[in-house]
Image (spheres, rainbow, N blue to C red):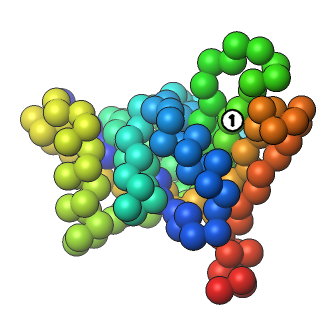
Amino acid sequence: MTVTFFILSYNMKIMEERIEKFIKGHHVMTLATVENNVPHCSSIFYVYDAEKSTLYFMSSPDTMHIRQALKQPLVAGTITPGHVSIARIQGIQFTGKFFQPKGEEFKKAKSVYVNRFLVARFMSSSFWALELHSIKMTDNTLGFGKKLHWDRLKEIEQV
């Protein structure tokens, strides 16, 4: 069985603490891809590494979302829990770009992931990364329709 590991990483320096707390508190994301005007979504388990501000996840390289992301690396996704009431709705929408990690980044990704998902130690794997470009978080616990935003380009401009 061949499995592909992915990394979703970003710099949390200026990002709202609520966004980071939300990411840490959940474990399933939806990845949206497209190729030749054919969209696809997939639900994927992830683990969060606060030190690297990175989400690690795995998926087989022969899945549609992985084939599409490799051909068109600009992707989008969401992280949302099940909702109990409209007043408690929270969720994240993100955009980013895939790339293949090398060296120390590759080693760190594998170490963090296999420590969380022990069965991954026994699987053949390829690692991939997704650098986030933007995040929008809806958080109705702060008021109906409240949005928190993070954008990599704006963060770079502020440094």
Question: On screen, 4 above or below 71?
Answer: above
| Secondary element type, mark 1 | strand
Quadrant in the picture for the C terminus: bottom right
- Examine the image and state in which quarter residue 34 appears: top right
Q: Is any atom of residue 40 visible in this view? A: no
Residue 46 in percent (x, y) is at 41, 38
Residue at 72%, 84% (x, y): give it.
Answer: 157
Q: Nearer the viewer, residue 67 or 132?
A: 132
Residue depicted at 64% across the width and 62% down the height: 15
The extreme left residue here reads 122
Residue at numbered disc 1:
91
* Depth check, front residue: 39 or 114: 114
User: Label 1 amino acid?
Assistant: Gly
Q: With respect to residue 24, does 41 lie above or below?
A: above
Instruction: Please state the horizontal and vertical placement of residue 121, each as a whole percent of the image.
Output: 12, 39
- In percent of the image, x 41 and y 46: which residue is there? 48
In the displayed structure, 35 sits above or below 63; it is below
Residue drawn at x 53%, y 67% is 11
Camera-side residue of 13 and 77: 13
Spot the residue most to the top.
84
Quadrant in which residue 23 is drawn: top right
Q: In this view, does 158 lie to the left or right of 52?
A: right
Label 1 neighbourhood size at 10 Å, few (<14), some (14-19), many (20+)? Answer: some
Q: Position of residue 10 (x, y in %)?
A: 52, 63
The percent position of residue 153, horizontal first and vertical second, equals 70, 75
Q: In the rendered view of the protein, which quadrant contains the N terminus?
A: top left
- Is residue 11 in sight in this rendering? yes
Is 105 positioned to the left or the right of 39 in the image?
left
Q: Which residue lies furthest to the right in this view?
A: 144
